[in-house]
Amino acid sequence: MIIARSIDELRQALSPSQRPAFVPTMGNLHDGHIQLVARAKPLGDCTVVSIFVNRLQFLPHEDFDSYPRTWEADCAKLQAAGCDVVFAPRETDLYPEPQTFKVHADPALGDILEGAFRPGFFTGVSTVVMKLFTAVFAGKVQGVAVFGKKDYQQLMVIRQMVRQFALPIEVLGVETCRAEDGLALSSRNGYLSEPERNQALQLSMALRELGRDALAAAEALTRHLPALEAKAMEGLRQSGWQPDYLTVRRRSDLQAPQAGDALVVLGAAKLGATRLIDNFEI
């Protein structure tokens, strides 16, 4: 397994490759990340994983400095998974000068839900992913990038960016990897205390119940949806959570649904000091 620290080292390592398969991460890898690597391997001639904690997507009060960095454990997991190249740039390698050119998501998609509660988040995500794509896929005829569906809105933003910039990259979304009890795996789960971990499944349970209620509303969904969402939010509040949103949207663009639309239910809420997100297509 090759470890590349600079873009030049990465491109040298990838020079024989015609179709890289790429998994971008911020490290602190868990089984969900390794599942993405496993899905990526048969899709290209070289499997690349990046490990980079991207300052641009953190708000000033968020956990950039304390975000877990587990380099040695990450490398061991990636080597066992058959990763070919790890791209682990320092901040000065990826951003050698202030990143004044940035990629802004379509506000209709990027300024709602996560974008509303974390202003600038998708600008930071889009900018770093574009830069990583340029580093990995420069000079390649085609490639594939693999993302988890747990970050559902992020996946949609990246797909739209790739489509609008006509990048020669296939973006594959992989189903959320879950613990045995159904909790979506996340690097931030490590912040939960033992009592909080036992309580954490309430978010996915609330989303599933909201999804069932939305399907039961059928043709009257538009009329009943605000009350169903308010009920789901209040249920979490009563259990000690601080919900940002629990909502039903249409899958195609995350806008308010109409009867007959394919639906996704999404939620974000804080349990103690830890903010968790989850979603289910219904």
Image (cartoon, grey):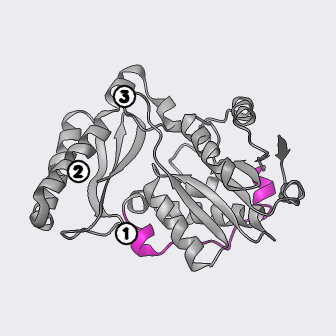
What's the mark number on residue 252? 1
Query: x, y (%) of residue 69?
Result: 66, 36
Label 3 sits on what residue type? Answer: Asp
Q: Residue at x 58, y 41 (%)?
A: 35
Q: Residue at x 13, y 61 (%)?
A: 218
SS state under label 3: loop
Judging by the rendered image, the residue that carries numbered circle 2 is 211
SS state under label 1: loop
Mark found first going from the N terminus, 3 or 2 = 3
**Side (left or right) of 207 relative to 192:** left
Residue 128 figure quarter: bottom right
Q: Which residues are magenta?
A: 90-112
Q: Residue at x 9, y 65 (%)?
A: 220
Q: Disc 1, disc 2: CB below 8 Å?
A: no
Magenta segment, principal secondary structure?
A: loop
Q: Disc 1, disc 3: CB below 8 Å?
A: no
Query: x, y (%) of residue 72?
Result: 74, 30
Residue 7 figure quarter: bottom right
Q: Residue at x 30, y 42 (%)?
A: 242
Judging by the rendered image, the residue that carries numbered circle 3 is 181
Give the CA distance from mark 1 to mark 2: 17 Å
